[in-house]
Amino acid sequence: MNTWLLQKEGFDKKDAASDGNRFLCANGYMGLRGVPEEAGSALFPAITLAGVYDQFEDKWREPVNAPNCLFIHASFNGQSLSVEDGSPQAHSTALDYRHGVYSRKTDFGAACIVSRRFVSMASPHLLADEYQVSFRLDGEMTLETGISTDIWDINGPHLFDYQLTAGEILAVSCVTGQKKINLAAAQCVQADFEAEESLRQDETGVFRVFRRRVRKGETLNLRVFSAVYTSLDEPAPADAAKSCCREAKAAGFSACLQSHTDAWEKIWTLSEITLEGNEEAALFLRASQYHLNCVAPRHAKNMSIPARGLSGQTYKGAIFWDSEMFFFPMFAYTQPKIAESLLRYRVETLDGARKKAAEYGYRGAFYAWESQEGGEEGCTNFNVVDVFTHRPVRTYFRDKQIHISADIAYALRSWYEITGDRTLLQAGGAKVILECARFYLSRANGHFDSDRVDFADVIGPDEYHERVTNSFFTNEMIRHCLDSALLLKDIFADQPAWFASLLKELNYEQDWALLPALRERISPPRERNGVIEQFDGYFGLEDCSLDTVRGRLRDPREYWGGDHGVAGTTQIIKQADVIALMALLPERFTDRQAAANWVYYEPRTEHGSSLSACMYALTACRIGRLDEAWDLFMKTAQIDVLGGGKQWAGEIYIGGTHPASNGGAWMIAALGFAGLKMRAGKLSVDPHLPRQITRLSFPVTACGERYRIDVTHEGASISRQ
Amino acid sequence: MNTWLLQKEGFDKKDAASDGNRFLCANGYMGLRGVPEEAGSALFPAITLAGVYDQFEDKWREPVNAPNCLFIHASFNGQSLSVEDGSPQAHSTALDYRHGVYSRKTDFGAACIVSRRFVSMASPHLLADEYQVSFRLDGEMTLETGISTDIWDINGPHLFDYQLTAGEILAVSCVTGQKKINLAAAQCVQADFEAEESLRQDETGVFRVFRRRVRKGETLNLRVFSAVYTSLDEPAPADAAKSCCREAKAAGFSACLQSHTDAWEKIWTLSEITLEGNEEAALFLRASQYHLNCVAPRHAKNMSIPARGLSGQTYKGAIFWDSEMFFFPMFAYTQPKIAESLLRYRVETLDGARKKAAEYGYRGAFYAWESQEGGEEGCTNFNVVDVFTHRPVRTYFRDKQIHISADIAYALRSWYEITGDRTLLQAGGAKVILECARFYLSRANGHFDSDRVDFADVIGPDEYHERVTNSFFTNEMIRHCLDSALLLKDIFADQPAWFASLLKELNYEQDWALLPALRERISPPRERNGVIEQFDGYFGLEDCSLDTVRGRLRDPREYWGGDHGVAGTTQIIKQADVIALMALLPERFTDRQAAANWVYYEPRTEHGSSLSACMYALTACRIGRLDEAWDLFMKTAQIDVLGGGKQWAGEIYIGGTHPASNGGAWMIAALGFAGLKMRAGKLSVDPHLPRQITRLSFPVTACGERYRIDVTHEGASISRQ
């Protein structure tokens, strides 16, 4: 079994959306969905750009898809050589996770296509495709390659004022509707055959058309080089795109591929977990690492990763808490520059978070639930469409999921703990933590007749229960945020003047004095038989099984949450909540507490989010439920291999890759199975290796040093590299 | 036009539910729905008992309907003389509002029925019917009269262990399922004809059957006397019921009717508003006064009136704030003993309110939203059924409509102002006010970082907007409650020891000191161009027309409120809210404020509750919008004449009479058009007579004195009687 290779035989149109995710190629700058070159918009082709957003009319704001500049379509003797309408006899697709190379082979009987392509990890703007077509009969061949403007958009269109240029290099320039960002795509080719060549341009794009007569047994070889730039990258994106593909062509396909694979090798050197004992698991884990690595913003210093990576426009291409909770750990321990970029994105969007807090009448920083460029909130008040009335439903993710600010503060503190680096805190990170703490000072709900403080009307990670009071997760993350704010004084004990001036700059002196009091007065959680109540009143909700709740659905696409949803009035939860907190702050709980809560909450959890299984697995490792940890690991790691996960929330399509699960797979392996931990400058492991695995071995970077962790059932070692 | 008479020609089964309400007879002890004597359960016959509740299985708790002890059914030559299946040629129904007498006349061609009946206002347990049947052909007649156990229940059955007794007096004894209350109905007859007589008893009840041959032109006359008792009235209810109808029969139908009409004459002497200038309006106002007077608990000292009167089991037969806001004023100004009974009900159910507060973790008294006997909360967490999924929807009336306690305190203070009587305050009323204020002390939401106090997560009168913060109505009613608590010290300034001992008994010393601070710190409302924001964020909601919102309905029975409802996310409100407050506490606002708010909110109000139009009308009078006040008056007063009003909330039937509108009609006429006011012991009028009315004249009782108010366009007078 090649544990680096994802393969699929056959073509089925109904799998196109899912396969586009599973076979994704990406390099952090852009993502190219895994559909064949000839695909029209019905198969959801897309080149999704990171950090470029647009809003059309009053629809949801979403990332922009570039024109399809790797479009190639052949026909032979009047037969379209297309998976969609060419009735292929055989079709196979593969993705090489090690080097990020997509390949396909399609046999149309009279002709056969073999191609491979990549989105360059060495050159962020470059895509290249090597396309071969061979013939079993004599006949007339037509081969079109070019830049298609037939773009699949969920809430588009986003691109206007198209300017097409045909010549040795084809080019398309256009501008986004809202912010007038210039976007250009260019393409040039290297053909190893002679043919009648013409150019075609119309409202569907600009194309180069090869026509010639071919003989039985003949194979034609075409190499396509494309590039995408926007005015956010370069003042003259069309020129830059043309230069990029011209230079690539000059270097040649093999050289470009070599640079690309070299770059991937470096990534694996830094991050690869070797898992022995179960090949399927090894494949899943590699797939997970591939998918998270390929969407990392390596080309930038202050970008984060959308919740659906670069697999399309779902989730509005927005940055969620997934970044801090699930993407951050692998990068922090393997490629700190990327982890730093994720956090710098938050530092640089502090003003957006301040604006949002002020919008709701609060002080400090209330980070966006769905953050787009500049920290603007992409989440609307109506995030679900009712399947019965087709009307938008008021949801409370935007305004009530206040734990987001504490999650960011948590990651900033983790950054300091894992890297030992204070510069990020000094360069704005400390400010973020203080402003988040200040938000909670102003959001806290006191009691008029007692000292107790509640956080009322919130949503915890379990979004099915809206507008609850004293969400345990939320309260404890807030307490941790207040702790982190107070800790800053110790961290900068050697620079008291700097810290004092920071407080002064933030006009924080009064608030500083309030932090310890708030910390102490937050209502303690209620417990029953050692089980912590998820929020006030949770234990009073109907206690029924997941099957009972599922049985009440009248439509499989119904949204489960809120007052109208089947779960909202029961104890069934969407995802890890109390257990998520125990996984994030394990030292705060005894093993016995962890076990009691795991046993209570796990059967009541739908795992309706890709953020759930990982948290349960981490806690399962700790309490020795290794078979369950294994099952949860497999569930987490397989998601972008097998293409599972929820596809719908009400009438909204939410499919795509699952970077949170991808990061979760690394977390379970490294933090759970190996028990990796960095505390007070000390790296340690505490293995809980399931019986299905014989060995785990992986590199770690911590406090600037490189280590290798090796775990078997016989023992574990940490060695300096 | 006879402005005391409601008449209807014809029979249509689809009107049966509505007609049962419009032609209701009642005496406070019980209500007899206005359906013909022979009606089976498909026409919703019911004798609904006040204050007797039962729960079957896990269905809603609701009032108990007694066995139908006025059942009479004739047939002639094999034809059933029944409106349902007898194909009547003509049918007319009438209700005499002055004396509470229902009559019907039905022509079946070969035979004709004429009857009249009443629920005695002189003898609370007695019902009587005079039933005549005449014949146009010779033939065989059968006449059955008895006690039918074929009871219409919404959430039943409620009665079990039936024991039937046949003899000179027919009787049915049974017990309720939940509390095992014994309930008995008895019937005896006086026939002025001879016939073959037999008795029948089976699972449908116990009946007396008359059979005889009749001649063309002959008329048979039957008088039926029935009675209902429960073990809450008498230890041996069956004996009591038998005695009651035996004595009535001995006295005779005419004597019984005379006592009944004498009792009604006394009621009208105390309460009748004479309206001149518009006969239709006069009829509507009389209908309103009839319907409210007939459900008043004259037989008891500590009962209140359900929101749907005694017209059936809808609204669970529960006591709502309607009692204090809409029933209380007419009784307080005309028949203070009844007003006192409404308030004593609250005084005696204080422990239920304390229990509810404690259930939610608060102190003091949180009164039930739907109060049944003992103050138990009849409102569930699921008060609406979704029309699309048929699933119950979580609603927040029970837990978030906290203004109910302040509404009760408001009525207690009004009682003192109108009657000048302190004894009710001393006999528990002061305790209620203090405990309500204490509830707000514990319910208030402070801010950790400021002195401001919110009342968050509440529902105001406009129930379409759930879980709002700083509902202006709620906040100001709470402030008024705190004021009233503080005022108690002045009211009892001459009895300082008693008051001190009251505070001590309630362990109130600390809380007393907090009252002024809370009063001062409640967040002030936001205003825009003089319009007060209904709650925090209301102005930010979609501002669209009522028609737009109505146009979004996918099912006419959809519930409009909450996050899923068409109104919940817009500025469209169910009923008067800011304007209700301005009507209740008019002195707190200038005419200019009242006008600005009226003009803003009125077009945004669905008037989807019978509690709405009255409040708008009162404020319309004040600001001189008399044509609008007139329209709202007519809308309010006509409701139980024409049978309007909402019949459905989701899938729940909510039809019945509308005592709140009935009381509202009195309020508009007396408090609005005449401008009646009692402040600081002084009765005054400030007329705003619409041009459609030439004269209003009515009796008032205030501070123990009787007055007559006379208002014309020429002037107004208050004369001592």
Image (cartoon, coloured by chain):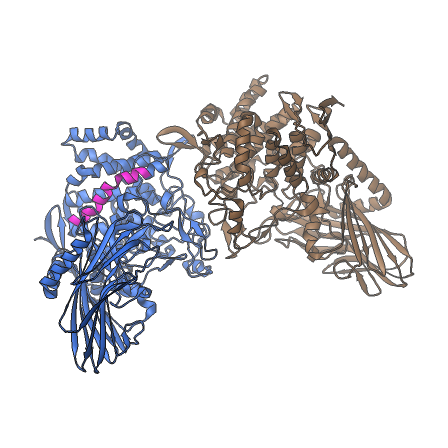
Chain colours: A brown, B blue
**In the foreground, B297 or B49:** B49
What secondary structure is the magenta-colored segment mainly?
helix
**Residue sticking out furthest to the top:** A494
Give the mark count.
Answer: 0
**In the foreground, A84 or A1:** A1
Is A540 placed left or right of B159 in the picture? right
Indicate whether residue A397 is drawn in magenta. no
Is A328 placed left or right of A7 in the picture? left
The location of residue B663, given as percent across then percent down, is: 23, 55
Bounds of the magenta segment: B336-355
Residue B550's place in the image compared with A397, above or below, is below
The location of residue A374, given as percent across then percent down, is: 60, 40
Is B477 placed left or right of A583 in the picture? left
Indicate whether residue B347 is drawn in magenta. yes
Residue A693's place in the image compared with B158, above or below, is above
**Quarter of the image containing the N terminus of chain B?**
bottom left
Residue A505's place in the image compared with B106, above or below, is above
The location of residue A177, given as percent across then percent down, is: 63, 52
Residue at image location 26% in from the left, 47% down from the top: B584
Residue at image location 48% in from the left, 24% down from the top: A512
Q: Is residue A304 visible?
A: no
**Residue sticking out furthest to the left:** B721
Is A240 placed left or right of B103 in the picture? right
Q: Is residue A475 visible?
A: yes
**In the foreground, A550 or A467:** A550
The location of residue B37, given as percent across then percent down, is: 24, 67
